[in-house]
Amino acid sequence: MDALPTDKLRQRCDPASLPFASTKDLAEHSELIGQARALDAICLSSKITHRDFNLFVLGPTGTGRHTAVLKLLSDQAATRELPPDWAYVNNFEAAHKPKALRLPPGTALTVKHTMQNLIDDLGSDIPALFESEEYQTQRRAIEQELGEAQAAAMAAFADRAKAEDIALLRTPMGFLLTAIRDGKPVKAEDYQKLSEDEQAQIDEKIARLQEDLAAVLGQEPKLEKEHRKRVERLNAAMAERAVSARVAEVEADLQAIEVVAEYLETVREDIISNAELFLQAAAEQSDGPFPQAIRKYHREPEFERYVVNVMVSQDREARAGAPVETEDLPTLDRVTGRIEHVSHMGSLMTNFSMIRPGALHRANGGYLVMDARRVLSEPYAWDALKRCLKNQAITITSMAERLSLISTTSLEPDPIPLDLRVVLVGDSRLYALLVLLDPEFSELFKLQADFEDVVDRTEDNLVLFARLVGSFALREGLRPMTAAGVARLLDEATRLADDSQKLSLRLGALSDFICEADHYATGRGSEFIDDGDIDRAVVEKDRRASRIKDRMQEAITRKTVLIDTDGAKTGQINGLAVIGLGDYRFGRPSRITARVRMGAGKLVDIEREVELGGPLHSKGVMILAGYLTSTYALDVPFSLHASLVFEQSYGGIDGDSASSAELYALLSALSGLPIRQGLAVTGSVNQTGEVQAIGGVNEKIEGFFETCVARGLTGDQGVLIPKSNIEHLMLRSNVVEAAEAGKFRVIPVETIDQGIAILTGTEAGIRDKDGCFPEGSVNALVEDRLRGFAETRKAFARPAKSDEDGTDK
Amino acid sequence: MTARTEPQKRLLIGASCFADAQAALRLAEQLTETLVGDLGGMLIEETIVTEAFDLPGQRVVTSGGTLVVVPSCQQIRSLIESDAKAFRNALVGLARTTARKWSFERRHGELISGLCEAATGWDILLLGHREIHRQAGKLVLITPPGAAAQSAAGLALDLAKRLRADLVALSIGPEIPELNDVQSQQRERFASEADLLAFINRTNASAVVLDLSAGPFHTHDQLRHVLAVARCPVLVLGAAQGEASIAHSTQISAAP
């Protein structure tokens, strides 16, 4: 029984091999280690100018994906030009279709403030102009001119009527003409007394003059219209003077921007035609404590039509280059922007000034980094993002509108052209699902940056890793770490990698250790973090998470869960399982038993029968059945009925790592040779009897070790592991120390034959040239037993056949 | 709080129909702010209007210039009834808005004589006349020869300011009356009453102000002519000097 040398049980980084005394001596290093493939992809995505080369970053959490992406994108963004500013302004011809203004970087806020000042100035100028004597005189002149024209027409009519002895009476319905006799209107009864000639004359005069009066009064609407037009022309002329003067004061460099000049022209025209807005605002002034001259007219609701609603404004002083934006809560509204509403008289109202920018607006011209899972979990956000990328334009649509939840006035803002690179950070499974289920995904996200989670444990990488640790400590304001501390941390990185030849790149978990160790170093007043602090952090983390593990070990110690750690038993073996709780894993032994008898070639996996076994476990059992049937008693029918069970397992089990243990238990049951209970077994088996690598080897060994420690180490205890798992060993120091003291062993095996020999203390046996196993060997005993089952079964079959024939043989 | 410097005047608004009264009420609204205390309304049902109806070919010419069939006597009575209610309601509304006392009365008879008789005890009589057009016109002050009627001039000046209208002062005779505060305004002098009336006839006026007690017009006939040619509301001071000519009166008490 060849136990593994103790130097194979754990990799140890020698602090003396590190070229520094503490991380204080190291140059800063912020580059990721071993991620060249992913970093190249990020660089390509950040630099390539062709459309749709958006990036999906995939890899395990804690590998520094976000940090690396943001750093690389920021570096590239700094070399690019500032993107333009964008603002929405009123469309004076169609208010529901606001216009988007593309402005030179850094000018949007200037334009906005310019417009505010313009409105404030005109708020004072226009009312003053319309109050002026000049305006009032001109207006009165228009009214007098038209009024006198009407008065003259009425006067002429009155003169004619008077000359013809016709009086004009006012009645509730209108004017009534009647004849005058002796200075008084003629009554109806007097009229009847007049001669026919006189009556005819009166009738003719009244009829004619009625028509004349109707014509005079009928002029009034025309005069009124003429009056309105002339007053409007006068108002426009007055407003035009004020507006043009103020617009001309706008700084020349803004006027030189074509879109600004065009916008100012439309504003000028609109203010001229809506000058009454300023008059109304002035009329509604309150007698507050502030003088009228400093009144901010641009804040009044009626002047919202002249607002410049800045969507995005670049700050030249704060940042050079393109933006790199992140959106932590990528809802539809926050990605594409939203249109807000206000409640007014029971209705929801909106206008262009209530358009709010989203992450796409802020990142336009640069980069946008989002978490893929969050984008996909927000309703309609993924759909909207794809649509914007596909159309290369930002179109704002609200979720309520899409779901027809509200019916109210809405807007159709000009789409803003989109030119940005979207970077989604997610995991491999999400990437695979998107590729599989969303045909547009591969078109829009042509690049993937696949982050490694481990890197080779080479000398160069150890030093680089040390520099990375030093940089982290410096960046986070932690104490520097001694070489011993770094060495201990590197060993832990190897442990996290589940591979003695690798280092884990899950920097998040290592950073947690460093921070906790720094805390302990602070507690003991040290200037450095040393290996003791790291060790304590590791132990404390394990202790915090190990409540359930401890309870399970206690159950074993108190024999509530039956595990033997000494003696030997037939058909019983200690298997090993790993239990995972979040990122914490621990191993524990499990008793596996096998029972056999003659049968029809059926191997009952009790776990599978009661649906407590997963598919991989079932597969393992079927493989070992295949091994049995193809290895023993090949010339007779396989006449075994066997049952296998994980004793006291109530929560289900999966994986094939116990298949070798189950096979050993079966072989023991068939051969009748007892298995040494001081040993535990892990490893899967294939149909040819080779023992294959499994996961969680360290936790499994440690789980059995702790059980043995609790029961008392005898020196005969140990664990059989697949030989191919040797490179994965990174056992805790206490296990290694026990091994060094000869109290515990880790035994690698390559085949079932090796394993059963160790477990039973009897050679497995190899078929000789006659095809027979050596007598007394495990295999010979197994084959004999199986052959015996077949013979017995055959014997059962003969009487039945003779009964059918009706003869005795 | 602003203390009123002048004693409040009592204003009687008179008209023969609501269309005339409406124009007068608009003017009264301007006066109530400072000048006017109590408000009175009087609708005179002119006998001549009902008697002059029913001539062959006679039509009513509406303010919009449309010829319509003359209504029957019953319809006219209904219209007058309706006008009286509207007049009263508008007066009540104005009085409530301006916190003034009010009274309203309906009478039968001749408009000018009836109103002048009823104006006893009232400081100002406002004769209503419907608007022929909407263009704001001048404010016409008819001043007596010699010493000016300062109360009429003050009223005219105040009203001109409120209406933002030009004030034109008219007088008869060779002498130019003394007018405090009206010096800068337009003044016209006429040789005869007919010339003055002819001038008013051709003037686009918003209102005419005169003082019957001061002249140059004193009689009801003269006042009737002024109203006819002005074609706008006429503010009359000293109106009570006219002859009484009331045929019938129905007092309507103020609302509680």
Image (spheres, coloured by chain):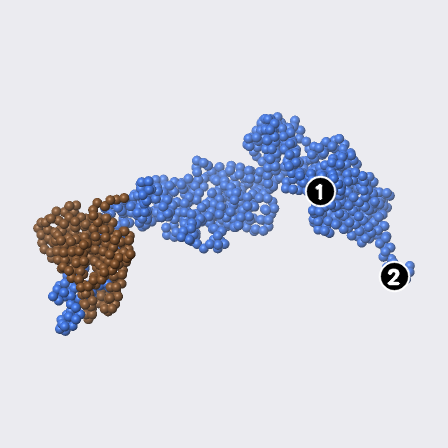
Chain colours: A blue, B brown
* x then y, percent, for residue B164: 22, 49
Q: Amino acid at mark 2?
A: Asp
Q: Residue at x 50, y 49 (%)?
A: A384
Q: Amino acid at mark 1?
A: Ala
Is there any visible trace of residue A647 in the rendered image? yes
In the rendered view, would you say A363 is above or below A536?
below
- Give the number of the disc on residue A723: none
- Chain label for disc 1: A
Circle 2 crowding by C-alpha within 10 Å: few under 14, some 14–19, many from 20: few
* x then y, percent, for residue A412: 43, 52
* x then y, percent, for residue B155: 19, 50
* Residue to which mark 1 is pinned: A577
* x then y, percent, for residue A332: 50, 48
Most extreme residue toward the left is B174
Distance in Å between CA atoms under marks 2 and 1: 52 Å
Q: Residue at x 61, y 31 (%)?
A: A517
Circle 1 — which element?
Answer: strand
Displayed quadrant of residue A225: bottom left
Circle 2 — which element?
Answer: helix
Displayed quadrant of residue A733: top right
Say whether marks 2 and 1 touch (CB < 8 Å): no
Q: Is residue A207 left or right of residue B172?
A: right
Is there any visible trace of residue A255 in the rendered image? no
Q: Residue at x 20, y 68 (%)?
A: B53
**Camera-nearest residue between A785 and A40:** A785
* Residue to which mark 2 is pinned: A803
The first of marks 2 and 1 along the sequence is 1
**Camera-nearest residue between B238 and A109:** B238
